[in-house]
Image (cartoon, helix red, strand yellow):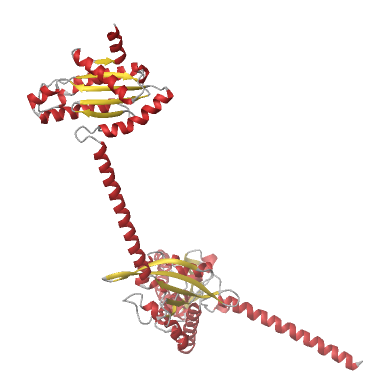
């Protein structure tokens, strides 16, 4: 039984020790996690500030570096009290009570540490006082002065006359604001805050001059230098831990060693990316904990052509998946881009040559189909376009009219004013004809001063109205538009026919319109003659 109880007690003790160990380990883990929230640089800076503050306190204990507020206040208050006693004793002996009161007020006003002051006779009578003396004055025990309540005896001759009572402010602050304004608190605050900032800045500059690549084995650096791609290995803060030879060859001004510099701070790399540091590929890869690929990079090379690279960044994770750095590769695609650029240039040249050929073909087509003087269709292109229109209208029994136009007495114009003026007259008449027609109407310079017009979808009456409008427009505007022949009068004659009058071919329709034109010429010119009217008159 005894052995069993001992065994149970031993087992319970082991369980208790195990619980204590687990609790201690849990506390250590909590402390470690809280400590890990600060960067190593911040922890070093805090340690240096703590050491500095400790050294100052040790120096004060050993050599009294900081002044003692109590002793300093005691000495100052002793001198002030003795000086005030000398002045007030003289006034008491003179019996000058008014001056005594003014002196008490003046001393209390000049000394900011004095809360109140009074001159009291031995019988308890107050001869003079300043401030709320009753409120501030507390008689010290045993009649001995304290740091805040001072008693100074006054004598009249050899006999005691009374005493001077002075109530001072407490030396140590009694409020939080008072402590915050205390010189020692201000000094220590400045030491902690300012020292931390200065140490942090200084250590950061010092670390920039340390070589973090020393932790990379030589065989790893040699293997990375054998790669054609540029390779950077960055720490979680974006500082360069390793840069292979391929990366250093990307820019002629690249340093041989980067000495823990941030990749985003390299001038040529920052200028090539031309974005904020937070948008750089490695910054985004570390922030999102995922790969960022395909970022284009154009790297200037001084007087030479720039190099083109593609940047890929991938975070380096530990066993728990936490990013511990970043692997950045720079694929030099300059040769490929130059080849592609050459192909694009060749393709652009081919496309431009094709556009030029098409343009020339259009010009040739226009030259082959447009009359160069009037800008109207020539006879060949007119019939090529008019035949399908006539066939369609004839098959559908749709309206289609033909209008022949001739400039009256054109030979006389050439004889009197010259062929140059005659050409201008043809151009002006053609211009007026175009302005009066619809986009789907066909206008042709049929020959010499004669024009042929095809009017699809227009009845004979409608076409007659159009012809009259054109005739009047030519008569009113054509002559005035020829500046070299003032007073020139230009008129025109028209002949009109329609498929509704029985023409079964395009040539027949145009011949009918031409016969009507001839009738207009015979009947005095400057008029429009319809073929149906001409037929009726012939039959009569």
- Which percent across, then down, holds residue 113? 45, 71
Q: Is residue 321 left or right of residue 517?
A: right
**514 versus 419 height, above or below:** above
**Which image quadrant is residue 473 in?**
top left
User: Residue 249 in the image: x percent, y percent?
Assistant: 35, 78
Pick the front one: 152 or 173: 173
Residue 168 in sight from this viewpoint: no
Residue nearest the viewer, comparing 268 with 390? 390
Task: Point out residue 100 in the picture as x, y percentages from the top left corner.
Answer: 41, 67
Q: Residue at x 58, y 74 (%)?
A: 321
Decide: is 229 above or below 459: below
Q: Nearer the viewer, residue 386 or 330?
A: 386
Q: Is residue 153 left or right of residue 385?
A: right
Query: x and y percent of residue 208 in the render?
Result: 40, 80
Name, please, the residue furthest toward the left. Answer: 416
Residue 459 in view, yes or no: yes
Q: Is residue 506 above or below residue 354?
A: above
Residue at the limit of the structure toward the right, as seen here: 1
Q: Quadrant of the C terminus?
A: top left
């Amino acid at each position: 039984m005894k052995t069993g109880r001992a065994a149970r007690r031993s087992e319970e003790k082991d369980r208790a020790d195990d619980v204590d160990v687990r609790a201690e380990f849990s506390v250590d883990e909590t402390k470690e996690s809280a400590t890990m929230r600060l960067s190593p640089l911040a922890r070093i800076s805090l340690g240096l500030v703590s050491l500095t503050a400790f050294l100052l306190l040790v120096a004060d204990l050993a050599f009294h570096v900081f002044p003692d507020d109590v002793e300093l206040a005691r000495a100052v208050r002793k001198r002030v009290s003795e000086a005030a006693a000398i002045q007030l004793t003289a006034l008491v002996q003179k019996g000058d009570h008014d001056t005594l009161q003014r002196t008490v007020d003046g001393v209390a006003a000049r000394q900011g540490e004095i809360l109140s002051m009074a001159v009291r006779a031995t019988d308890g009578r107050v001869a003079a006082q300043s401030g709320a003396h009753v409120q501030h004055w507390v008689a010290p025990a045993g009649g001995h002065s304290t740091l805040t309540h001072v008693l100074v005896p006054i004598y009249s001759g050899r006999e005691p006359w009374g005493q001077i009572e002075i109530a001072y402010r407490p030396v140590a602050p009694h409020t939080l604001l008072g402590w915050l304004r205390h010189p020692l608190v201000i000094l220590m605050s400045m030491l902690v805050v300012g020292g931390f900032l200065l140490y942090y800045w200084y250590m950061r500059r010092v670390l920039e001059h340390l070589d973090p690549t020393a932790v990379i084995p030589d065989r790893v650096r040699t293997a990375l230098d054998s790669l054609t791609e540029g390779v950077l290995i960055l720490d979680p803060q974006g500082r360069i831990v390793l840069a292979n030879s391929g990366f250093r060859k990307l820019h002629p001004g690249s340093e041989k060693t980067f000495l823990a510099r941030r990749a985003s701070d390299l001038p040529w790399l920052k200028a090539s990316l031309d974005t904020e540091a937070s948008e750089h590929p490695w910054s985004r890869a570390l922030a999102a904990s995922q790969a960022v690929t395909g970022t284009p990079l154009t790297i200037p090379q001084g007087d030479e052509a720039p190099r083109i690279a593609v940047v890929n960044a991938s975070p380096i994770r530990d066993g728990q998946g936490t990013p511990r750095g970043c692997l950045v590769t720079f694929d030099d695609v300059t040769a490929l881009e130059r080849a592609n650029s050459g192909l694009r240039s060749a393709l652009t040249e081919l496309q431009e040559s094709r556009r030029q050929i098409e343009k020339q073909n259009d010009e040739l087509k226009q030259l082959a189909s447009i009359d160069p003087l009037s800008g109207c269709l020539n006879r060949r292109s007119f019939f090529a376009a008019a035949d399908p229109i006539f066939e369609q209208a004839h098959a559908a029994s749709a309206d289609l009219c033909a209008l022949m136009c001739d400039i009256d007495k054109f030979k006389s114009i050439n004889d009197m004013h010259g062929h140059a003026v005659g050409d201008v007259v043809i151009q002006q008449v053609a211009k007026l004809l175009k302005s009066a027609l619809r986009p789907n109407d066909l206008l042709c310079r049929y020959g010499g001063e004669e024009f042929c017009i095809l009017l699809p979808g227009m009845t004979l009456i409608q076409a007659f109205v159009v012809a009259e409008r054109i005739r009047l427009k030519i008569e009113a505007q054509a002559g005035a538009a020829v500046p070299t022949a003032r007073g020139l009068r230009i008129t025109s004659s028209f002949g009109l026919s329609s498929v509704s009058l029985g023409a079964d071919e395009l040539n027949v329709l145009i011949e009918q319109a031409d016969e009507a034109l001839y009738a207009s010429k015979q009947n005095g010119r400057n008029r429009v003659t319809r073929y149906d009217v001409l037929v009726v008159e012939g039959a009569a």
